[in-house]
Amino acid sequence: MLKTANLSYKFDDKYIFSNLNFEITDQSVYKLVGDNGSGKSTLLKVLSGIYKNYEGELSFLDKNTVFYSGHKTGLKNSLSARENLYFDIRLPKISHSQINSVLNQLDLSDYSDIQSVYLSEGQKRKINIASFILSSASLYLLDEPFNNLDKKTSLLLEEVFNIKINKGSKIIFSSHDRSDDEFSLIDMNLFS
Amino acid sequence: MIYLLKIFQKEFLIYSRKSSSFISPVVFFLISISLYPIGISNDPDILKDLAPGLIWITILLSTLISFQNIFSEDYEDGSIEVLLASGQNISLIVLIKIFVNWIFSCLPIIILSVFSIFLLYLPQEGLRPLIISLLIGTPTICLFGALAGALSLGKNSITGPALMLPLSLPVLILGTQAINYSLNGINFFSNILFLIAILIFLLPIILFASVGALKLHFN
């Protein structure tokens, strides 16, 4: 479904990562770990198609159903949580009832009509999680999705990971947390 | 098609809530055309001759204020990254953004330019070519603004205008000339046809170039 062969990316003649080889065919969650500057975010941007001038090979089965969520939230400050979700380009067929349901699930109902500029970083991150929950992509690329989340939302996110992979999706996310868990690890330190 | 409609709704909502996006150009325009009679001359004959050029130059400078905003917020909040990763037709989305920017930054000024009859003593026969030339010329200026905005993302605020103003000169000349022709009893429609031709010719080229410029920032 997703395969890289000798994938490298350089910036100003310095390789961020080089000769990265991996293949994702099974329904699984892959965790990108590595030190700061090891290229986790860069790899996610290469895989999502944002960065195109990479070296090596990168092949997808279905490039059109990739969901990318980066460091920046992509939220519009002048729009409310509900409006940001309704107008999210990654959710073209979303209904208001689906939005209400997920906002309720994430305890955002009371803040759903407040402009995003007045929300905390954690609440903004939760809106991104809501987009992730509502999306039906085949590959998810998430850059440090657990940042700024409370324990309850982190557990919910892990639950959603399981729901997504049971539906046949693949997930690649980056994290600084190297702790032992059920996720398959891709250590970026080995390629930087 | 539905997602394009949603993008139009979204952009419209964002601009309508960001009052500075349409109030600043309007205030700049009104203040400028109010000051010309004080700063240049209050002689109607002098102002009448200068009015076409003054109006077009003022509109060009007024709209400069808003062009920096077409992509800068999307760049800062990460929306462009999401857009590039989405696999959607970026050219159409950029076109919608430019159109909404035109609605909020140019359309109010075009409507207010009617006041130049009173403030700059523009003869009434100059009003029709003024409005027509502005309706056709300002979308081209918006296209140049979008290209300049895309190229100057993350750079200082003078880069955009420095790129855009030279490109806008043909539109400025044709627009001003159309009004002058009309005031001198000459048929001005050849100028309007030129403006239409420029718009049609440049639309796909500048859209393509703007999308390329946006992508350039990520490579």
Image (spheres, coloured by chain):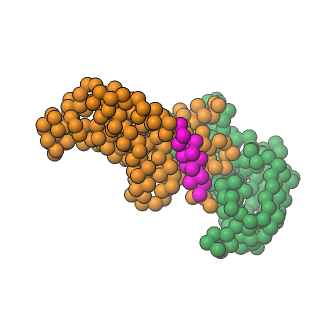
Chain colours: A green, B orange
Quadrant hosting residue A3: bottom right
Q: Residue furthest right?
A: A26
Q: Residue at left 23%, top 40%?
A: B50
**Magenta span has B115?**
no
User: In the rendered view, does B161 fall on the left or right side of A116?
Assistant: left
Dominant SS in magenta = helix
Q: Residue at x 26, y 25 (%)?
A: B124
Q: Where's residue A88, x and y in %?
A: 61, 40
Which quarter of the image is occupied by the N terminus of chain B?
A: top right
In this orientation, does residue A4 appear?
yes
- x and y percentages locating residue A176 in the rendered image: 67, 65
Looking at the image, which is closer to me, B149 or A46?
B149
Read off the magenta span.
B200-216
The residue closer to the viewer here, B63 or A10, is: B63
Relative image position of residue B113 (x, y in whole percent): 30, 32
Tell me the residue at 41%/42% (across/down): B171
Whether residue A93 sits left or right of residue A80 in the image: it is: right
Is B212 inside the magenta-drawn segment? yes
User: Is residue B21 among the parts visible in the rendering?
Assistant: no
Quadrant of the image occupied by residue A87: top right
Give the residue at x 60% y 43%. Answer: B91
| Residue A75 screen position, x and y as percent | 55, 46
For the C terminus of chain B, the quadrant is bottom right
Q: Quadrant of residue A14?
A: bottom right
What number of labels is visible? 0
Q: Nearer the viewer, residue B53 or A71?
A: B53
